[in-house]
């Protein structure tokens, strides 16, 4: 239901305190990327490379959500606004952390089953005294920034399909722009613009086509008619899927009046299951440029034609003016999952250059004449019917944590990673009404392949976009590290998956400051100034797709996920309390009673239904329980009460009776018992009889 607080239509033209402020506001941080170009560069320089070693904690605020935190805070006129897990919005005094208000949209916890990657939220938008947040259950809500009261709410996605919203809205010319997620579960992507004052829908642009011969009645209808020629068969529309969900990446050029949308992967991933193994499948994995007031299409560039590797183009889009070959060019830059760093002419969409920023084996290069990748034939696993060990993996060379660009150094700073994983086609795939629908055997064991996490790397990379080369890198302890902030003080800030907040010199990567925040940091930092004092803030909280990298489980048990707002300033003197002791893990499984065939079926069903949340090969190192240690596996009736009857639905664990029968649920239990006994034997062999969690390696696939 649409709740209207003010039905007046937003005016057009420049907005005092609105668009003009977003375009240029040095002291505040008014939109998620600080400015329309999404550079995440601040001109503030009170904190610089000569004094960053004096940084200390100014204040902190516990969020108490115990989940992944991925938002960039906003600060407007001394007030900080943050969104947290479960789409909750909070306001604080930006100088001392005093809570001002909290808005909880009351997202049903059962919605977690429709989220590919945790109950996260990546931020709010601010415009003319209002905040806008997208919720995990698909609503867009306007909030009075002064009081925290709801102004209006609109359901932007179908409630009966597996859509979510985790991305930050953007407000452009009085239009609130919002996308959605759901490609892993089987959804059709689209982007919608709403009137910022009233919540009235203004336009919608679908990313992939729907049923042939049935226009949507939206601005994208001409493009969908053209896109259908690049799809084959009828599986995608009969499954109400196709994917392409634009869940995070947007940027805007006010001079060209172009909104740039980064689109997502195919649904299902497997192109044979989606499109008979044929066609480019527009507009998957593309940059699409439209007019923000009307949604009118202007141009597109497809980075991965016929995607089947989850190589999204939803990673951060950055706009800049660069001198290339002696000529100043208006460019769009992106380091998407697929491992190539792209520079496009943002007026025309033509690719200027594209080079590998991490090792890549799915394609040898990007042909600049055609703009298409020169593919490795072995990468088409769905056609060949053989596993492909893809580099980058589905986690990408760079995932959602935003990169930053400094006009002072001319460098782009990328949270980079190297991780290869297998793609294994599922020939028996049929769309399921619950859970992941990729058409692949996620987490499948491929005996001839090496253990992927042993070779995984994570690092902060400084990249020269003009010359398309690495300048320096700062190694990290794990893959899955946080987003980036660059400042005019020649400092770059980043949090790490192992919980450290770091400042490095922008020109050479020398570390200037580090503080352990007691939990993994995935979100991008931001900076602001109040009454002449500069602060740097970041949200800490392990979860999302990178729960395994954060490794909440250690040798001494399970550690608490202490999600927080951390705010730093020169000579800050606040102290975090001591981290609580880890909770001991007791491994006490019953005896294995099932035969090998039942356990093998349990492994297959676990990989299909459970692995995304609870860890591949039954090893969890993130927020969700490690089921080998669950007391529920000891009793078949208790197990069924959770898995089939939905005993824990209010905690996010809904009933899986739509996709599992009694025998399949029992097979999963028997598989977990077998894995628990394996772990118990391993522990006894390595540690005597002392029962502790070992260092099994999960294999991850996600967006």
Image (cartoon, rainbow, N blue to C red):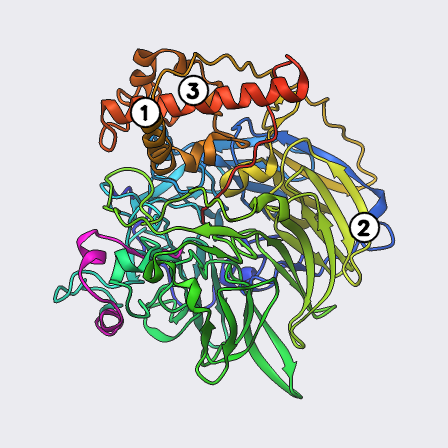
Q: Are marks 3 and 1 in contact (CB under 8 Å)?
A: no
Secondary structure under tag 3 reads helix
Task: Identify which residue is drawn at 56% across, 57% down.
Answer: 397
Quarter of the image where one finds residue 23: bottom right
Give the mark, 3 or 1, whose residue is nearer the N terminus.
1
Q: Nearer the viewer, mark 2 or mark 1?
A: 1
Report whether residue 532 is seen.
Answer: no
Q: Is residue 264 above or below residue 618?
A: below
x 73%, y 41%: residue: 568
Q: Quadrant of residue 24?
A: bottom right
Name the residue at the bottom extreme. 326
Q: Kindly report the distance in space between the C-alpha atoms of the residues bearing marks 2 and 1.
A: 50 Å
Residues in magenta, as a range: 222-246
Percent position of residue 640, x then y: 29, 18
Q: Nearer the viewer, residue 239 or 258?
A: 239
User: Do we see residue 22 in this rendering?
Assistant: yes
**Which residue is label 3 attached to?**
673
Q: Is residue 380 left or right of residue 358?
A: left
Q: Badge 1: few (under 14), some or many (20 or more) residues near its Cα, within 10 Å? A: many
Q: CA distance from mark 2 to mark 3?
A: 46 Å
The residue depicted at 33 percent of the width and 33 percent of the height is 605
Q: Is residue 240 magenta?
A: yes
**Separation of marks 3 and 1 at Cα, in angstroms:** 10 Å
Is residue 522 placed above or below 99 in the rendered structure? below
Residue 527: x, y in percent?
A: 67, 50
Decide whether residue 181 is among the magenta residues.
Answer: no
Residue at the image point whose x is 47% and y is 42% from the top: 121
Q: Is residue 55 left or right of residue 78?
A: right
Disc with the residue nearer the chain's start (2 vs 3)? 2
Q: Which residue is mark 1?
A: 667
Tag of residue 123: none
Position in image of residue 365 (x %, y %): 53, 74
């Amino acid at each position: 239901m649409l709740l209207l607080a003010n039905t007046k239509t937003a005016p057009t033209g420049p907005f005092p305190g609105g668009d003009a402020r977003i375009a240029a506001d040095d002291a505040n941080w008014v939109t998620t990327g600080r400015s329309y170009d999404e550079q995440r560069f601040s001109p503030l320089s009170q904190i610089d490379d000569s004094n960053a070693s004096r940084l200390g904690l100014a204040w902190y605020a516990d969020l108490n959500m115990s989940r992944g935190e991925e938002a960039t805070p906003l600060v407007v006129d001394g007030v900080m606004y943050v969104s947290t897990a479960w789409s909750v919005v909070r306001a604080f005094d930006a100088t001392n952390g005093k809570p001002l208000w909290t808005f909880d949209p009351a997202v049903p916890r059962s919605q977690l089953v429709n989220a590919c990657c945790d109950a996260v939220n990546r931020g709010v938008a601010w415009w003319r005294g209002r905040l806008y947040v997208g919720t995990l259950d698909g609503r867009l809500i306007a909030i009075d920034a002064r009081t925290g009261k709801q102004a209006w709410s609109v359901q932007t996605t179908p409630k009966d399909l597996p859509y979510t919203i985790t991305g930050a809205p953007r407000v452009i010319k009085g239009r609130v722009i919002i996308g959605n997620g759901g490609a892993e579960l089987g959804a059709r992507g689209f982007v919608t613009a709403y009137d910022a004052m009233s919540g009235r829908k203004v336009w919608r642009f679908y990313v992939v086509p729907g049923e042939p011969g049935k226009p949507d009645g939206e601005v994208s209808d001409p493009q969908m008619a053209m896109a259908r020629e690049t799809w084959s068969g009828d599986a995608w529309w009969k499954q109400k899927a196709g994917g392409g969900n634009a869940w995070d990446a947007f940027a805007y050029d006010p001079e060209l009046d172009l909104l740039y949308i980064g689109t997502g992967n195919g649904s299902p991933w497997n192109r044979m299951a989606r499109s008979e193994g044929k066609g480019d499948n527009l507009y998957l994995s593309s940059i699409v440029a439209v007019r923000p007031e009307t949604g009118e299409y202007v141009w597109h560039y497809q980075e991965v034609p016929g995607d089947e590797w989850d190589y999204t183009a939803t990673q951060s889009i950055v706009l800049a003016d660069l001198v290339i070959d002696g000529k100043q060019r208006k460019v769009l830059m992106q380091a998407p999952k697929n491992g190539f760093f792209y520079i496009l002419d943002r007026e025309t969409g033509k690719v200027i250059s594209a080079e590998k920023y991490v090792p890549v084996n799915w394609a040898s290069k990007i042909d600049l004449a055609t703009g298409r990748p020169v593919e490795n034939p072995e990468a088409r696993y769905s056609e060949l019917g053989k596993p492909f060990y893809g580099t980058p993996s589905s986690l990408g060379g760079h995932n959602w944590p935003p990169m930053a660009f400094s006009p002072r150094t001319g460098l782009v700073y990328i949270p980079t990673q190297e991780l290869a994983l297998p793609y294994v086609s599922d020939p028996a795939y049929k769309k399921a009404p619950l859970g992941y629908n990729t058409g692949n055997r996620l987490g499948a064991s491929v005996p001839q392949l090496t253990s992927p996490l042993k070779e995984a790397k994570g690092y902060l990379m400084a990249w020269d976009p003009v010359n398309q080369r690495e300048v320096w890198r700062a190694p990290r302890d794990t893959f899955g590290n946080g987003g980036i902030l660059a400042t005019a003080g020649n400092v770059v800030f980043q949090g790490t998956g192992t919980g450290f907040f770091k400042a490095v010199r922008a020109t050479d990567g020398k570390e200037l400051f580090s503080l352990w925040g007691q939990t993994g940091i995935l979100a991008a930092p931001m900076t602001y100034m109040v009454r002449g004092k500069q602060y740097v803030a970041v949200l800490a909280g392990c979860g999302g797709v990178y729960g395994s990298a954060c490794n909440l489980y250690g040798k001494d048990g399970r550690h608490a996920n202490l999600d927080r707002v951390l705010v730093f300033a020169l000579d800050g003197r606040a102290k975090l309390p001591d981290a609580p002791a880890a909770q001991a893990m007791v491994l006490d499984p019953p005896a294995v009673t099932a035969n090998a065939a039942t356990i093998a079926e349990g492994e297959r069903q676990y990989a299909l239904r459970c692995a995304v949340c609870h860890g591949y090969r039954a090893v969890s190192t993130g927020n969700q329980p490690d089921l080998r240690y669950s007391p529920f596996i000891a009793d078949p009736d208790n197990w069924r009460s959770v898995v089939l009857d939905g005993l824990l639905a209010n905690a996010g664990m809904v009933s899986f009776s739509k996709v599992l029968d009694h025998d399949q649920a029992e097979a999963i239990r028997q598989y977990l018992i077998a894995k628990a006994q394996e772990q118990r034997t391993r522990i006894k062999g390595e540690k005597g009889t002392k029962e502790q969690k070992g260092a099994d390696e999960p294999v991850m696939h996600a967006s």
